[in-house]
Image: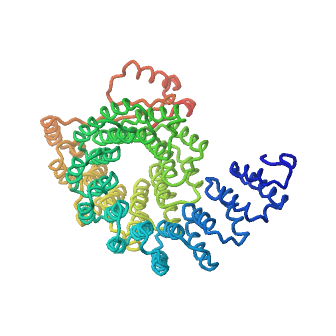
Amino acid sequence: MLLSATAVQPWNSPLPALEFASKCKTQMEINQIRANLITTGHIHNPSFTSKIILNLAFSRHKPNVDFARNLFFDYNYKDPFLWNAIMKSFSHGNEPENAFQLFVLMLVREVLLDEYSFSLVLKSCSRLSLLSRGMQIHGLMLKLGFGSDLFLQNCLICMYVKCGIVQSGRLVFDRMPRKDSFSYNLMIDGYVKCGMVSLARELFDIMPSEMKNLVSWNTMISGYLKLENGFECAKDLFDKMPERDLVSWNLLIDCCAKNGKMEIARDLFDRMSKRDVVSWASMVDGYAKLGDVGAARIYFDAMPRRDVVSCNAMMAGYVSNGCYQEALKVFHYMLRNSFDLAPDSVTLLTALSATTQLGCIEEGIAIRRYMEENGFIASGKLGVALVDMYAKCGSIEQAIDVFEGIKEKTIDHWNAMIGGLAIHGLGDLAFDLFMEIEKLSLEPDAITFVAVLHACGHSGMMKEGIICFEIMRRVHKIAPKLQHYGCMVDILSRAGQIEVAAEFVKEMPVQPNDVVLRTLLSACSTYENLDIGEPVAKHLIGLDTDDSSSYVLLSNMYAQFGLWDYVRKVRTLMKQRELNKVPGCSWIELEGTIHEFFVGSTLDHEAGDTYSAFSADLNLDGSSSAISMDGVGLR
């Protein structure tokens, strides 16, 4: 407690309250200050309370600022300095809309306005893009004779530019009798942000050379880098710069990394006399996006200091290149160094993606536990990722638990849940969830219909699938894409409607790809329809000579009809083209580690140990005994 009844005497001295006011952080401490002011009578002393107001108005702690405002409004102050202080607390704080109201109150109470008052209210108009109010302030400035002030003219330019009316900003700029570098930089930045890079360049070229600074050069470079073909112009400006800072170098390196120009990026990186974490992270991200995770890791390991962004870039690189275990190793490294590398939401999303791909539910449960312990809410993208992870790792019950716990669900959450139900063959529940979306008047998207059609296909719900397809087209006016047509072919094919599926493919307004045709071919093989299957298979063989599945399906169909000569011809053709059937693959999670097995593969020493450990839980007759799901999970 900062103050007590016996802490400081005599009570008529204002010094203790003034001294302790600057140390307050909580509402309880502010209440003690208020009590002290009331009991001593100093709350009625405007000279003293004004000092408290100035002491607390710019505090980082909300209770302090609120108390300063309350003190201010309790007394009819006339000092413009106090009014400006409170107005700044609004314009630069979390309630900028109140700055304009306070400015109006200054006019009503005839408090003297100065340049600072106008700059603060213009700041609030800029932050909220309040163009009409900003124009009113502009008019009042001209009326009261403040229109020629350089500082306020720059504030006006800033206001018009941030409101998206760059032409009005240019009018103010052109009428200025005197301009400084800030005036030019504001206009150049405004043009760049509005995509008017050519106009920005014209202004940059006429800008006096002595006024050009790093901000001017860097703004122009960033403008060119936003253009599709602006790299060469940006590079030319970069080479002409009289001096460069880290921002200049990082802008160019980041652009090269994002566009796959890693040789240029490496050359720039090597030429830098000083680098920061942004420089290193750009190199890591660039090589990772090119698929060269080895080079990305070299730069990552060489970093003198890592931050969360660079770790996220390394993790994302591993995930996008299929190195899921390595991504999780980086995640665990961050957890071990959480004081400096505390994972953020991007980290968790990437870790969940890797976990989902591996099917490692224990890792996913650990990530969820970390989220709960560190204040991450399972909503937004994190909620979607958790639902998806649990569903794809085999625990649809936990996926439903996460989904039901999300208070504000977006269509992405519904899509993830429907997709998860589809994976588990729970088409009835997926269809019910889709109908719930319709009842709630939520607007489904194309992904929603892919998920629900997929669910209908896997559950043999042909009628419901057709209904969803028609709702998509007729009710929501969503033009079907190739994925939707593919789902419909799958639905019809699984239902044995081979002729209808074939006719559907013929009438598709888009060209069917190999996936759609293989779906139809697989159904032809299942239902022994050689008349439709044979031409489809031959067409696929002509399209893609590297995929063996079409050859195998055609061979199997010939075998079903006893056409062994044709079987031999297909197998001979596969040998001539050196095509092999892709072996089946299975995964097993044993004590937190994912093991992979292929059909026909030879067990190495480690795999043999895994097989032995798993076999120990099997009965001699081959039936499974009670297996602890905490230790072993089949994928």
Identify the residue at image location x=73%, y=53%: 18
Instruction: Report whether residue 98 is seen.
Output: yes
Left or right for 463, reference 620: left
Residue visible at 50% across and 37% down in the picture: 341
Tell me: 111 left or right of 588: right
Confirm whether residue 467 shows in the render. no
* Foreground pick, 69 / 367: 69
Q: Is residue 330 above or below residue 524?
A: above
Measured along the vertical axis of the image, is residue 48 above or below residue 424?
Answer: below
- Give residue 68's position: percent from left, percent from top: 68, 61
Give the camera-side residue of 591 and 260.
260
Can you tell which quarter of the image residue 490 is in?
bottom left
Give the image's coloring scheme: rainbow
State the quadrant of the C terminus.
top left
In this orientation, which residue lies closer to the viewer: 447 or 556?
Answer: 447
Q: Is residue 370 left or right of residue 68?
A: left
